[in-house]
Amino acid sequence: MPSPISIRLTEEMDVELSETSKLLQRSKSYIIKSALAQYFNEFADYQIALDRLNDKDDTMLSAAEFRSEYGS
């Protein structure tokens, strides 16, 4: 079940959201939900990369080693 939320936007953000909504012929809610979904996906990728970077047991290859081993 969808959960309502209330946010305060700057006037500039509200104008841009309204213009984008009209341009795409989509609701403001649709655009906000799409933006949040994209943010969450990118954040998840970022967290995976950060976790791997901080994993002392994870082997790191240089670009040259990668090309040598896997071709380019």
Image (cartoon, rainbow, N blue to C red):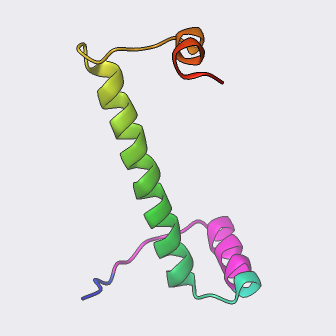
Locate residue 51 relative to residue 33 in the image: left or right.
left
- Residue 45 vertical placement versus 37 (above, below): above
Q: Quadrant of the C terminus?
A: top right
| Magenta portion: prevailing SS class | helix
The magenta segment is 5-21
The spot of residue 51 in percent (x, y) is 29, 29
The spot of residue 52 in percent (x, y) is 32, 26
What residue is rendered at 74% in x and 79% in y? 19
Q: Viewer-proximal residue, 66 or 41?
A: 66
Q: Is residue 70 magenta?
A: no
Q: Is residue 17 magenta?
A: yes
What residue is rendered at 42% in x and 39% in y? 46
What residue is rendered at 35% in x and 38% in y? 47
The spot of residue 63 in percent (x, y) is 58, 15
Q: Quadrant of residue 26?
A: bottom right
Q: Quadrant of residue 20?
A: bottom right
